[in-house]
Amino acid sequence: MDSNSDPKFGSLQDQADSLHNSAELGYSSELVLKAMDPMIERRLGSLLDQFENVKPELGPLLDLRAKISEVWRIRRDMKNNMRNGKNAVDVMKRIVEANNGNASGNRTNNPT
């Protein structure tokens, strides 16, 4: 096993790649949500409100409701990706800051 490996998380490169991918996905999700979220919120909310007047035996409309609910789920997943991406960016920033501090000789375990 690589000396930079942790059996739970894999190599440091794998961990860095995972953080980068999460950050990239989060950034992409954020861009899409910034542009579309207000429109999605208004339109889906309006459509779902209309189902209060639908009789249960109207199957096609209930199928439409399921499809609308799926779009809500996708939106929620994108928001979660955005949050996870921001967390990944924060972790990467802390790693870089820690490495910059160690490279300049500011180690906490060195007596001065």
Image (spheres, rainbow, N blue to C red):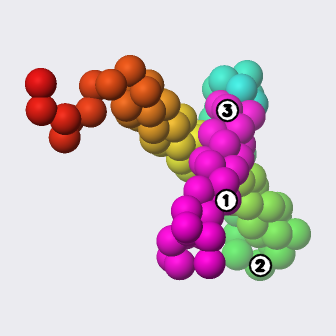
Q: Amino acid at mark 2?
A: Glu
Q: Position of residue 8 (x, y in %)?
A: 51, 76
Under circle 1, the secondary element is helix
Q: Measure how far apart labels 1 and 2 are at the Cα level.
A: 52 Å
**Most frequent secondary structure within the magenta stretch:** helix
Task: Tell whether 63 sits left or right of 100.
Answer: right
Say which label, 3 or 2, has the lower sequence index. Answer: 3
The part of the image, by quadrant, that contains residue 62 is bottom right
The part of the image, by quadrant, that contains residue 51 is bottom right
Which residue in the protein does label 3 denote?
Answer: 27
Judged by depth in the image, the label closer to the viewer, 1 or 2, is 1
Query: Badges 1 and 2: C-beta atoms under 8 Å apart?
Result: no
Which residue in the protein does label 1 denote?
Answer: 14
Q: Measure how far apart labels 3 and 1 are at the Cα level.
A: 20 Å
Under circle 2, the secondary element is loop
Q: Position of residue 71 (x, y in %)?
A: 74, 53
Is residue 25 a member of the stretch shown in magenta?
yes
> Up-down: is 58 above or below 72?
below
